[in-house]
Each structure stands twice: as structure tokens, then as C-alpha cells.
Image (cartoon, rainbow, N blue to C red):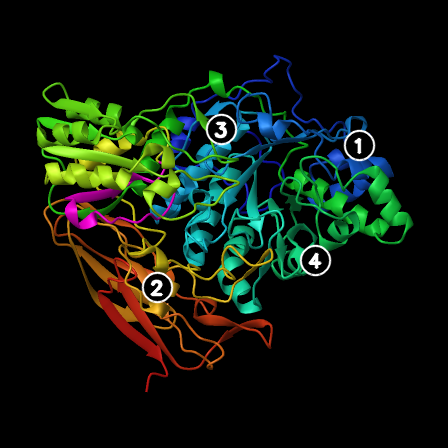
Amino acid sequence: MPPAGRARAGRLLPAAGALACALALVIVPGRADGAQAAASRCGDPAARPWCDTSLSAERRAGLLLARLTDDEKIALLASDDPFGGPLGGYFDWAHADTGNGIGRLGVPPLYMADGPAGVRQGRATALPAPIALAATFDREAARLYGKTVGWEARHRGNDVIFGPTVDVLRTPLNGRTFEGFGEDPYLSARIGASWIKGAQGQGVMASVKHLAVYTQEKDRLELNMAVDPRTLREIYLPPFEAAVKEGGAATVMCGFGKLNGRWACHDGGVLNGVLRSEWGFDGMVMSDHTAVHDTAEAANGGLDMELPIGLRYNAFLLKRARAQNKVAQATIDGHTRNVLRTMFEFGVFDRPAYPNDLARVDRTASETAARTIAENGVTLLKNDGVLPLAAPRRIAVIGRAAKESQAGFGSAKVVPFASVGAHEGLARRAGAGASVTYRDGDDRGAAAEAARGADVAIVFATDSQGEFFDKSCLTLECGEPLRGDQDGLISAVAAANPNTIVVLQTGGPVLTPWADDVAAIVETWYPGQEGGNALARVLYGDVDPGGRLPVTFPAAEAHAPAAGNPAQYPGANKTATFSEGVMVGYRHYDAKGFTPKYPFGHGLSYTTFRYGGLKVGSKEVKVTVTNTGNRTGVAVPQMYLGLPSPGVDVPQPPKQLKGFTKVTLRPGQSRTVAFPLSARDLSYWNVEAKRWKVADGCYTVMVGPSSRDIAQRGSFGACG
């Protein structure tokens, strides 16, 4: 492992677990060009006192800052590579962004890559989509995910990885639904913080994105998002707060659009006030590409580094702004100090440049991680007893998605070294004694005929999501019109074979009008390069389906959040009004009284569980989970709170997720799980006082396997 430098405790953590054992066998070679780099690129501390590693990062930054010219200070405030971003997905030498550094003073270059779902730079391990990671409801899976991305980013020669994406899902039409961690801020916060710890434990810096509110692709470059203070604090900011306070994120990326009239990368109230003053963030803030609109506003608003190049942060514009007294020299110095201090804290000065050698090192651990996470996120929505498969002799595999991988497009798309599709994985697992017939589904009659002659029919359907465009609706046809009528194909196959299994490979919720007609529904999300092997192991019962829904599947399009209200989405006159307030995701369905098709937190096991022995307190909730079936299986106990409302002007959702865990239990085995509660868990944002406050009243505790399947109830507080 590379030296960590003088990183703060909790940031560059040592690797642990099975992945670490595999990674420990990988010898980090010299630079890709064969040159032997020195242990430190900084230089001799006698001549360059900022190279003294016994000093604090703050002190070292100050010493170096004093030696920089004005032009050199400004040069560190923008990336220098206008071509890296578009090329980074195809060529292994092309970083998303590059800061050239200052050679005369030993300031090393800073290399950056996209990475929410793996490294988007040439070929890399294509991990399951982040929404699949959220479906694991597993902090350790998130840490493994981050470790894998961080390790590969390092072996592509990068110092910074752009990820994770922790934007809370507001509308399931969002084109980047697959790239985030779902509709709940508590889940997104826990998964995101663990992801960051895993990545930064590999010696790279994570850049959590996109602060502060980013919820749609439609009009994203111009959109003004009108969000009230309570909604901002309770829904959209908590994942970023956890990324900073729990995950120790090195960098934060501000996004596109405006929040209440202020461009995200100019918003001093968020960047200077909340992020730095309240949360204590001392890393650097970088912009999304071309998200900066005004030099002085960005500088005064808290932006440290502009990407992809200095369109607004350049010597001409910053010097002019200083001469016009629009930007103080101290402000420019402060941003340069933030960049340098972060680089010192994360050891960039004090180690050799990372080699770009991913194609030449053993990636077995990464491939195993991809399969393990995919299995952990596969979500069984329905099962009438057809699963797990009992070695059927004749299997009909239907649908182009069985052979064509879907990963979402845009900055999260990864080009894998190799991949295993569902048809290949199933055929291999079925073995030589089984007959596996494939039909692409273009001819519905031929597909139905193949299904009719099989013991079991497995139909694959997918949508299409990605950066730049939102979906026009939630049916499968809206997601991928070129694939034809996938809903009709599923219905035709189901009519031909009662043992029809539908495998969804989607980036988020879709409508399932055929759900009552099929025997089983399995959601695999965008499962990554090991998706075929992971799915086969789940379908055959080699592993229990480990996923639970991080998003609600609606029964009807009109039930979805922000549906039917153009002022909410996509917005009127380039303004989206968040008038739903805190009623986002499952909170919306609960508050409106809509019954979802499959609720948040839902997911079946191949065994059954009983919940009992609930013990409730204001600081901890405990419940005992027992496996009542005859197979080892995975349970995901979830704890929700119903908070008392302090007044009619502060409505509370019927329930809010405040705890979850994941346990594997043998038949008959019981385990008591505990959910700690903090004052913050019991608080709402008091707008008048501008602080978190615990309301007086009765707190309802709900524990169960999903948001709509509550097995145990209790209460504490003034319940009368």
C-alpha cells in the first residue's frame, strides 16, 4: 500500500477484510514509463521547508503559499486539461481532469477521474450501478465498493476520484437515478460515508457530489430549484454532512443549476456557511464541468477549483476582479491554501506518482467484489415458489437484455475489461445436462413458443438511463423505445408458461403491469460486469437474494412523487418548486395514502423471518430476528420513527428511516440487533431558530422488513 502521508484520523484507513488480503498480494510497481520516482516528489526540506513531513498540513501549506507568485496561485485553482473528460471513457491515458502543478517548487500534478460506478478511464472493473449498492443496505458492501474503485483509480494513476454521488432521488424520471443511492437521505448518508472510507483507504481522494441539490437532468444547466430551509436540511444536505463528518471526504463537488436563485458553485451560504463553518470541512471544493458562471461570485462564494479548465478562474479574470475590489487577495490566497492543504493532508507531495498499470496487475479481487456486490443487491420482488431453481432441464431465456449489458450512460459509464452476461452465466450454471434456449424477443410468437416448451421461462427487460436526459415516463418502453414492447413480450411469455420469471435490469423504478401474471420478479439493477454470474447464483439459490428496494416502485405513474405537477417537475420558467417539502420518496406515498406496488425496503428471501422482543428507549431500539424457514437467509431489519409535529406548519412524515442492519441467519437461528438513536435522529430543523430541535411529544417506533411491512411497534416520550 502507498504511504498515506499526514492524513487525519479516519481518512486514509488501512484496508481490511478479504479484499485487502487480495490487494496485499499486488506489488505497486514504479511509474508506467519505467522511471524510478523518488519517495517524495516535494524535495529537500532543507531547501523547501514545506516538504518537512513533521509539520502539519496547514503549516506546510502556509510555507508554500508564501513562495508562490500570484500567477502560480491562480494556476492551482483550475484544471489544465480541456480534453481529458470526453476522452477519459475510452483511453486509459486520459484523465477526466489534470492539474499540472508547479514544477519549480515541487508541487506535483493532480490527476482526477470519474468514478461513481468504477473508473471511467479506459477499461476498468464495471461494478454494479450505485443504485444496486444502495439496494444492499450494507455499510460493509459500500466500503468494499469504495475500496475497489479507489484501488483501481490509484492504478490508473489518479489522485482524485469523482464519487460517490449522494444526491437524494426526488423523481424516478431522473436520468441519473442509477448513479445515486435512492430516495432516502439516511440510507444515502450511511452508504456514501462508508464508500468514501473505503476509497480513501486506498490512498485516493474522494469527491462527493453534487452539492447541494441536484435532482433532474431536464434543464440542469439553467434550472433554479426553489427549496425551503427545512427540506434542504432534512432531505438534501444530510448525505453530504455524513460524507464530511463520517466519511472524511477530501473534496466536495458543487453541481449545476441554482438553489433559491444562487448558482451552486457560487453559493456562499452553503459552501462557506454550512459546509465549512458548520460542518468543519477543510478540504477543497471543486466545480462540476462548466458549472462556474462568474469569477467574483464563485471566488467569494467558496469555490476552490474550477473544472475542466479556468474559464472563470484564470489570471486575467481573477486579477481584474482583484483590481476592481470585487475579490480580495486574501480570498484568492485562501482558495490556494485549501488546495495545497488538502494535497498535503492526503500525502500527494510525499509519495511517488501512482502508476497507470491497471491492465498489468491482478484484478481478481476487483472482479470478486463486483460479483459479491451484485449478489448483495439483487432484489427479489415476487416469488410464487418457482425460485430458487430446482435444476430445470429446459430453460427459455428471452430478451435482448439477457445478452446486452446495460450500465447507464454519461460520466458514470465504465468500459469493462470483460463481462459475463445473464445468458452466459445461466447457461454455465445450468450445466451440460440442461437445455438453454435463447430468443431475443423481437418475434413475440417465437418467444412464446420457446417458453411453452420449457420448464421455466426467464424474460429479461431493461430501461435506459443516463446523464443529460430524463426519462419521459416509467414504463419499460419509455426507457428504451428501440427494444419494442417489452411489457407485451412479458405478457405473451407469461401466457405461454406459468413458470415465468421476469428479470429487470433497470436503473430505477418501472411500472410492472404484468406483475400478477408472472411467477417471480427479480430486480438486478445495472449489475455490472459480473452480473451474469451473480444472477445465476441467486436464481439457483447458491446465495440468498440480498437486496432491498432503495426506491419505491409505484403502482401507477400518477402516484410517483412530483407527478402531474409541472411546477414541481420539470418546473415552470426554468424553476422547479419543491412544494412537496420533506414528503419525498416513501414519505410521499405514505402522506398521500398511495399503496405502492413494491414499497421502499421491500425484498424477499428464500427463507422466512419472525420479529419479536422489541425493546424501545430514547437512545436505543432492540429487536430479535429469527429465521423460521429451512434455509440460511439474509434479513434486513429496518427501524422507522414517527416524530411528533411541533405544529401544523411543521408536518412530519408518517415514518422516517432511522436505522438498518443486515444479518445472515441459519434455520432456527435468532439474533438481537440494536439501533442506536441520537438526538439528531429525533430532531427536525427549526427554521426560526436555524438549528436542530427535538420536539416534545410521542415518538412512534416501527421495525420490520420494509417501510410497509411493520412487524413490531412501540413508542417513547410523552405518549399520554
Q: Quadrant of residue 623?
A: bottom left
Magenta-drawn stretch contains 513:
yes
Return the residue at label 1: 48
Q: Quadrant of residue 31?
A: top right
Label 2 Cα crowd, 10 Å radius (few <14 / some 14-19 / many 20+): many
Marks 3 and 1: in contact by CB < 8 Å? no
Which comes sooner in the sequence, label 2 or label 3?
3
Q: Which mark is residue 589?
A: 2
The foreground one among 482 and 425 is 482
Q: CA distance from mark 2 to mark 4?
A: 34 Å
> Could you say where residue 363 lies in the image, as x and y percent from the top left?
41, 23
Return the residue at label 3: 152
Q: Which residues are magenta?
A: 504-526
> Could you say where residue 190 lies in the image, as x and y percent from the top left?
44, 52
Q: CA distance from mark 4 to mark 3?
A: 34 Å
In the rendered view, tell whether residue 15 sits above or below residue 682: above
Label 4 Cα crowd, 10 Å radius (few <14 / some 14-19 / many 20+): many
Closer mark to the observer between disc 4 and disc 3: 4
Q: CA distance from mark 2 to mark 3?
A: 40 Å
- Specify the amino acid type for callout 4: Gly
Q: Secondary structure at mark 1?
A: loop
Q: CA distance from mark 1 to mark 4?
A: 34 Å
The foreground one among 520 and 546 is 520
